[in-house]
Amino acid sequence: MNEAEFAYRIRQALDEGASQIDYTVSLRLEKARKRALERSSATAAAPLWVPALQLATAGAGIGSGGPAARSSWILRFGLAAPLVALAIGIVGIKQWQNDNLVAEIADLDFAVLLDDTPIDTYAHSGFGEYLRAEQASAM
Amino acid sequence: MATRAEISEFLAGAERRAFKQALFAVRDQDNALDIVQDAMSRLCESYSDRPVNELPLLFTRIVQNAILDFFRRQKVRSTWITLFSALSTTDGEDTDPLESLEAQPGSASAESAQDQVERGQVVGIIEQEISRLPARQREAFLLRYWEDLDVAETAATMKCSEGSVKTHCSRATQALAKALRARGIEL
C-alpha cells in the first residue's frame, strides 16, 4: 500500500472519529461559532471612522480592532505629544542656562586677563582687604 | 466577500476537524475547544471580507497558529511555575505529555476503545497513534491528507520548505503504519 492509499484510509477513520465527537463538545463548538459570528457582525456594524475627540471619551467600549484601535493610538499620541514637548523644553532651558554660564565665565576671564592689575594680585590675601577698604571709602 | 451564512456554513463543516486537530496537539479537550473558539473569532473578525473559497486555507492557518500560540503560552507559564516552585518534584518541561495521557484510564479515548464496537476501537487507536506522532510530522500529515492542502500550501502554513513537508509526511506515514501494525491493525 502506498502513502496516498494509506493516508486515504486514515482520513476515513479521522472523518469517522470527528463525526462521533461528544454531544457536549459539538454543542460548545456550535456556541463558539455563533459567538464568533455575532462578534463579526458587531465589528461590521461599527462605524468605519469616528472623530478622535469622541473616541477619546467613548471609544474604549467599542471593542478591539477597527476604529477603536485607531482611536486608542490617536489618544495615546495625543497624551504623549505634550510630554515630549515638555521634555524638549526642559532640555532646551538647561542648555540655554549652560550657555549663559559659560559666557559669563568667559567675560570674567577676559576682564581679568585684560586688566592692568597683575594676576598674582588676585591671589594675595591682602588684596581683598584693599578692595573692601576702597569700597568703604568710596561710599 | 463571504456572507455571514457562508461563513457559518463553512465553520460548521470545519469546526470538528479543527477541534480534533487541536486535541491531537494539546491533548486536552477544554484547551482544544478554546483554541478552536479563538480561531473562529479571529477568522470572523479579521477575514470575513475574504471570498468564501479562501476561508479553508485561512482557517487552517489560523488554527495552526492558535495551537502554536497555546504552546508558547504554556512554555512561558511553565517557566514561571518552574521558577516559583523549585521544591516541586515534577520532572520539568521534558516530561512527555503522553505519559500523563496514558496514566488516565478514565479518559474519553480509553473509554471509547473499551465500550464501543470494533470500528470505533480502530478509530480510537488510530487517533491515539496520530496524537503520538512528533508534532511536525502530525501537522504535515493532517494538513496534507485531512485538510487536503497541497504541498506548497502545507509548506506555507507550516513555514517550512516543500521538501520538509514531503519528508514529514513520509515519516509520519511510516511511523503510523508501524505503530498500527504493532497494535494488530492492518489497513
Image (cartoon, coloured by chain):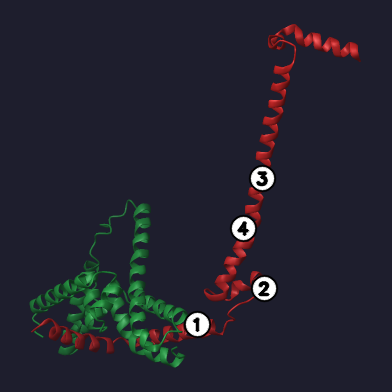
Chain colours: A red, B green
Secondary structure under the numbered disc 4 in the rendered image: helix
Q: Quadrant of residue B103?
A: bottom left
Distance from Cα at disc 4 to Cα at disc 2? 18 Å
Question: Residue type at mark 1?
Answer: Arg
Report the disc number at residue B20.
none
Residue position for label 3: A90
Structural crowding at the residue carrying mark 4, measured as other residues with C-alpha within 10 Å and reported as few (<14), some (14–19) or many (≥20):
few
Question: Residue type at mark 4?
Answer: Ala
Residue position for label 4: A80
Mark 1 vs 4, N-terminal side: 1
- Tell which of B178 and B118 is nearer to you: B178
Q: Quadrant of residue B165?
A: bottom left
Question: Residue type at mark 3?
Answer: Ile
Question: Residue type at mark 2?
Answer: Gln
Distance from Cα at disc 1 to Cα at disc 4? 32 Å
Chain for disc number 4: A
Secondary structure under the numbered disc 3 in the rendered image: helix
Q: Nearer the viewer, mark 1 or mark 2?
A: 2
The reply to whether callout 3 and callout 1 are in contact (CB within 8 Å) is: no
Q: Is residue A91 above or below residue A112?
A: below
Q: Quadrant of residue B54?
A: bottom left
Report the disc number at residue A54.
2
Report the disc number at residue A39.
1
Residue at figure coordinates x 23%, y 78% from the top left: B151
Q: Is residue B38 visible?
A: yes
